[in-house]
Image (cartoon, helix red, strand yellow):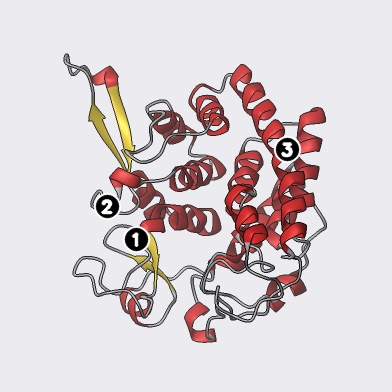
Amino acid sequence: MLNKDYEINSKQLFWKFRPEDGLFYHSKYPWERGDTYFKEFRGEYDALFRSGLAYIAYGDEDIKQGILNCFRPYIIGEDRKIEHTKYQASRASNRFGEDDVSRDQIILALAALEYNGDIEEVQEIASRLSFRVSKRFLMTPVMWFWVKYLATRDEKWKKRYAIIQTLELLYQVPLTKFLRWLAGATKQIPIPHDQHSDLPYKKGKRLKLYKTIGYPEYGLHFAAWRYYVTPFEGVLGKLSRSLMRWQAQDHNLLFRILMRGKQVTQQEIESFEPTNTFMWQRRDDVAIAWIFKLKPEQYEYNDIERDILKTLIQNEKDRKENS
């Protein structure tokens, strides 16, 4: 359930809605220094990404506006014509992180808008994004074709996107599964854990190779959202879904929904214990971050990890009943 009360968000909850800008942040970690602008609301480097997830989960207009405000219009060219307007994304409000905003932030923002039927806004933004999304990052080919389809709704761009995404999965998924087996990162690690915990695999060259060239789970997460909001069928669709299901862990409930896998039950959702990360974009057989379970009062509201599952399942059910 969404809660937007300032006091409850700032003092109690882990996932925090910030009324000033309509974006989602999280509680301050022990190693983080105080910030006079964000104050109790931290995680500013991933605020746009996190708010995309929250907009899917709650469909709230304030969150939508917060997302839209992260795309700043600017005009390029000497003649400064309005038709040359571009959009520069930021990681959070007040133009925070414009210089290094990543593809991840933009993909989730566009996917959330597309999921909620904000087609006019999606087309407007997608048609004015540059291939260079920031000083640090460029689009990948698969993202470029996907964005071109969102902007034009031209099937030729969708076909190109489908081909590139399937080819990417076709070599990345088998390679990653082999590298993970080679590194020995195949056993579930209990939560809480971090990179310095007692781990069921050895650190070394094999693990480094897996982490360096393996297909990261967050990459699979973004591929799944791209597919879910702009699905393609036929051989490419079946192959893409099969490859993504093969890569994902069986207990990743979000992937099972996005990739039309085994039905997710209410019992599975309720038995899941919320964490300090969006667990559905991570694996629990390799440690790459500090992950811990939240206290019940921290997820009394804004329980994004579980709320997004409930929304997707309910909306799927509503669509089937109305079709």
In this rendering, position of residue 43 left or right of residue 313: left
Mark 3 or mark 2, which is nearer to you? Answer: 3
Tag 2's secondary structure?
Answer: loop
Q: Earlier in the sequence, mark 2 or mark 1?
A: 1
**Which amino acid type is marked by label 2?**
Phe
Dot 3 amino acid type: Tyr
In the picture as drawn, the residue positioned furthest to the front comes out as 205
107 and 170: which is toward the camera: 170
Question: What residue does disc 2 label?
Answer: 96
Tag of residue 44? 1
Density class for disc 1 (Cα within 10 Å; few <14, some 14-19, many ≥20) is some
Residue 25 to residue 84: above or below? below
Tell me what residue is drawn at x 28 percent, y 25 percent.
Answer: 85
Please give the name of the residue rendered at 75% of the width and 37% of the height, measured from the top-left corner. Answer: 170
Q: Is residue 243 left or right of residue 32?
A: right
| Label 3 with label 2: CB-CB less than 8 Å | no
Q: Secondary structure at mark 3?
A: helix
Task: Indicate left or right for 196 with 15 as reference.
Answer: right
Relative image position of residue 38 (x, y in whole percent): 26, 67
Residue positioned 42% across, 25% down in the render: 127
Q: Residue 268: which quarter of the image?
A: bottom right
From the image, tell me which residue sits under label 3. 171
> Mark 2–mark 1 contact, CB under 8 Å?
yes
Quadrant in which residue 184 is drawn: bottom right
